[in-house]
Image (cartoon, helix red, strand yellow):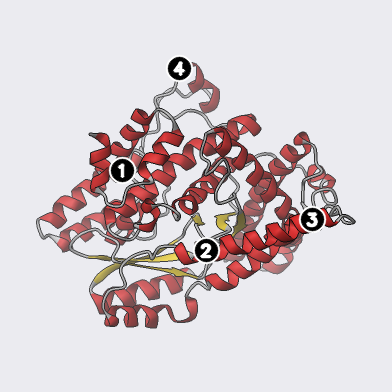
């Protein structure tokens, strides 16, 4: 999605007003309320940390040993991140960043924040190109003004981030409440998230079939060279398919959301990750790691809820950022956003990936593991030729991304069944109440019948 126009004047205008707003000190009542909420926040964080399900099977001791040897000190330190995030959210209860802005000012601050994220990505790309150019004799000098702007933007973004998070938390909570997704009349747990670098994820799948047999979170931002080393070592020593891939969010508490310059995606992800935390207190969440089917149900339910709530928040608070409809589009829309082009894209990613997955499954079912891996690599090269920079396409890739049984590339029938159940339920609240009671994958078929 093309980021919005960056306006430095808008950013400057919020430098003071969107940061720590003065707490209403002086009354014991206000102090007690904040203290009580801070204690409640810490309690919810600790409770959810205890309820977060394991991602994947632990397997034999040798499997764990090999993986730990491969990842070394690159494992994600959740406790350290949680401590920092909890301290910030507790501080926000006192300072209430963004609370004194008008709705229009809150809207402009959020838009400006995401526009600046786009500018940060643009500057980072230009700087990388400068240093990658073998003909550039003085990369430091050429990149210096861009680096200075990038540094200033990052500083400004960090100052505004608490206010933007709090604004979006309130907007998502409002829409969740209107949709009836409450517990005892309250949003539970409260919507709390932090823009951050989400951890990378090591997925391990058998070679002869596609399934997540082990999942380990890694520190965000590890180098591609390190990813390759980990994948090679784990794959060679355990004779498995391995992949290190990025995550868009993480359902810790507060939840993690990648600071990506697409407001539509961010709102969807905030609601998606909240749905996971909501399910931690219900059978569906308790049984997340019981089987591949339960993992897929959990992730697809979160995707359905996240998509609907995120779209409602965008439509209500940021209507100018609504994306065009998916294909097939009304004829009147096509020329507007494609500049006169009336035909769908020549290369359709979703259908290509669906075809690839089905053929891979067929080859693996016939015991043709080497042929399946060669086929996936040939398909990956076609993807790269069409602008999709997928580093590795293997069994682990499909095991991870196949957990989200949504979109035109999905092959798991669970996705279609859940969409049918959503339609039959009538309301999103009734749908979520129904699936929340599932404790095994067979419950989905029973609910449909």
Element carrying mark 1:
loop
Mark 4 → mark 1, Cα distance in angstroms: 27 Å
Q: Residue, x 16% and y 59% (percent of image)?
A: 371
Secondary structure, mark 4, is helix
Q: Quadrant of the C terminus?
A: top left
Q: Residue at x 48, y 76 (%)?
A: 74
User: Residues at badges 4 and 3 in contact (C-beta under 8 Å)?
Assistant: no
- Measure how far apart labels 2 and 4 are at the Cα level: 51 Å
Please name the residue that numbered disc 1 is placed on: 410
The answer to whether 261 is drawn above or below residue 221 in the figure is above
Disc 3 designates what residue?
Answer: 95
- Local crowd at mark 4 within 10 Å, few (<14), some, or many (≥20)? few
Q: Secondary structure at mark 3?
A: helix
Q: Earlier in the sequence, mark 1 or mark 2?
A: 2
Q: Which residue is mark 2?
A: 47
Dot 1, crowdedness within 10 Å: few (<14), some or many (≥20)? many
Observer-nearest residue: 247 or 28? 28
Mark earlier in primary sequence (2, 4): 2
In front: label 3 or label 1: 3
Query: What crowding class fits label 3: few (fewer than 14 Cα within 10 Å), some (14-19), or many (20 or more)?
Result: some
Residue wearing tag 4: 331
Where residue 316 sits in the image (x, y, percent)?
62, 30
* For marks 4 and 1 on the same chain, the one whose residue lies earlier in the sequence: 4
Marks 4 and 3: which is nearer the front? 3
Circle 2 packing at 10 Å, graded few (<14), some (14-19), many (20+), is some
Numbered disc in front, either 3 or 2? 2
Could you give the CA–CA distance between mark 3 and mark 1, rounded to whole angstroms?
Answer: 44 Å
């Amino acid at each position: 999605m093309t980021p919005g126009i960056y306006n430095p004047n808008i950013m400057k205008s919020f430098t003071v007003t969107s940061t720590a707003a003065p707490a209403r000190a002086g009354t014991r009542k206000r102090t007690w309320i904040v203290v009580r909420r801070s204690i409640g926040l810490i309690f919810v964080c600790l409770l959810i940390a205890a309820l977060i399900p394991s991602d994947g099977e632990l397997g034999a001791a040798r499997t764990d040993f090999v993986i730990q040897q491969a990842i070394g000190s690159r494992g994600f330190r959740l406790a350290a991140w949680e401590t920092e995030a909890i301290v910030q959210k507790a501080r926000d209860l006192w300072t209430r960043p963004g609370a004194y802005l008008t709705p229009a000012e809150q809207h402009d601050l959020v838009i400006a924040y995401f526009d600046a994220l786009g500018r940060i990505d643009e500057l980072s790309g230009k700087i990388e190109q400068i240093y990658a150019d073998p003909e550039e004799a003085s990369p430091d000098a050429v990149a210096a003004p861009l680096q200075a702007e990038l540094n200033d933007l990052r500083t400004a973004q960090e100052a505004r981030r608490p206010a933007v998070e709090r604004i979006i938390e309130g907007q998502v909570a409002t829409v969740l409440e209107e949709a009836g997704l409450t517990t005892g009349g309250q949003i539970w747990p409260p919507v709390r998230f932090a823009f951050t670098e989400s951890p990378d994820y090591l997925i391990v799948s058998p070679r002869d079939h596609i399934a997540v047999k082990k999942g380990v979170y890694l520190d965000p931002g590890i180098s591609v060279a390190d990813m390759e080393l980990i994948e090679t070592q784990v794959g060679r020593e355990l004779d498995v398919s391995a992949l290190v891939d990025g995550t868009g969010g993480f359902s810790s508490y507060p939840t993690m959301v990648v600071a990506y310059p697409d407001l539509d995606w961010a709102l969807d992800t905030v609601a998606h990750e909240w749905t996971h935390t909501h399910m931690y207190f219900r059978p569906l969440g308790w049984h997340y790691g019981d089987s591949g089917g339960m993992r897929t149900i959990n992730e697809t339910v979160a995707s359905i809820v996240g998509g609907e709530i995120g779209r409602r928040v965008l439509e209500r608070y940021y209507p100018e950022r609504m994306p065009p409809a998916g294909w097939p589009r009304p004829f009147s829309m096509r020329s507007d956003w494609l500049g006169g082009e009336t035909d769908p894209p020549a290369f359709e990613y979703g259908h290509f990936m669906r075809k690839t997955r089905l053929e891979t499954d067929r080859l693996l079912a016939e015991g043709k593991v080497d042929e399946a891996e060669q086929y996936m690599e040939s398909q990956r090269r076609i993807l790269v030729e069409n602008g999709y920079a997928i580093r590795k396409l293997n069994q682990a890739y499909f095991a991870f991304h196949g957990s989200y049984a949504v979109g035109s590339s999905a092959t798991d029938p669970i996705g279609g069944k859940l969409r049918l159940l959503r339609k039959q339920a009538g309301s999103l609240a009734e749908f979520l109440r129904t699936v929340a009671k599932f404790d095994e994958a067979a419950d989905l078929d029973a609910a449909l019948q």
